[in-house]
Image: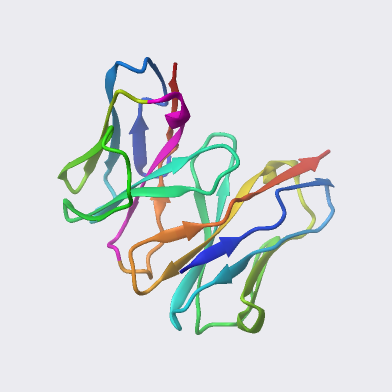
Amino acid sequence: ETGVTQTPRHLVMGMTNKKSLKCEQHLGHNAMYWYKQSAKKPLELMFVYSLEERVENNSVPSRFSPECPNSSHLFLHLHTLQPEDSALYLCASSQDTTPFYGYTFGSGTRLTVV
Amino acid sequence: AQKVTQAQTEISVVEKEDVTLDCVYETRDTTYYLFWYKQPPSGELVFLIRRNSFDEQNEISGRYSWNFQKSTSSFNFTITASQVVDSAVYFCALRETSGSRLTFGEGTQLTVNP
């Protein structure tokens, strides 16, 4: 266990479904991140939250909607996804957004869109 | 723009061999941080090392060592006497001081065969 917990570990959803990914950390970190990891591609930063405020949004399609209700929890709401959205979605946290701190990652949610 | 290149997509070695994973980066910042992460089959990225741009001293930690050369913008990672448990995908990453983004290379899949 890294201190960052992601649920579910695996998710299969149809293109018309609505689902949510959950990330939880109890490390006392103030920044949380969503990354997408597709096969044969670098990890792509999707969203950055610092103290529950979104600080970066990297041209992510609106079918992905993040939510950070408090500094310990981060959600990624999914709706009307496409098959190319199938990937490993990784959540990470860090002390804050200053570069000095590395990230602590969760084990990811393996998403398959059918 | 920042960029990290890991030219070796896959490396296969026999146990007890030494292996070096290459990482080359691009940045316009004079202050930045470099990281290596390990991703075992379980999925989570495990932090291995952080190096800041002002510290070019090489580091050794057990069987792991890192060679940071600012002149060639490289931050290579060597595993000595490799073991089967070292089999994983290894990512090099760069974080500039001017943003909150951790940029990853495409990763190197290391397979250590018994």
Q: Foreground: A41 or A98?
A: A41
In the image, residue A25 lies at what x, y percent?
Answer: 29, 44
Going 19% across and 49% down the picture, which residue do you hit?
A: A71
B85 lies left or right of A113? right
Determine whether A17 is above or below B2 in the image: above
Of the 4 image quadrants, the one containing the C terminus of chain B is top right
Does B59 sit above or below residue A52? below
Q: Residue B23 lies in what quarter of the image?
A: bottom right
Quarter of the image for residue A103 reads: bottom left
Give percent across and percent down for residue A5. 35, 37
Q: Residue at x 42, y 60 (%)?
A: B102
How are the residues colored? rainbow
**Magenta-tinted stretch:** A82-97
Taking the spot 64% from the left edge, 84% from the top edge, the residue there is B71
Image side of residue A24 versus residue B44, left or right: left
Above or below, B109 against B48 in this view is above
Q: Magenta stretch containing residue B56, yes or no?
A: no
Q: Is B58 displayed left or right of A110 in the figure? A: right
Give the answer, above or below, for where B97 lies relative to A10: below
Left or right of residue B63, residue A81 in this image: left
Residue B70, picture quadrant: bottom right
Counting the numbered discs, the total is 0
Say which of A75 and B37 sits in front: A75
Viewer-closest of B106 and B36:
B106
- Residue A86 spot, x, y in % from top left: 46, 28
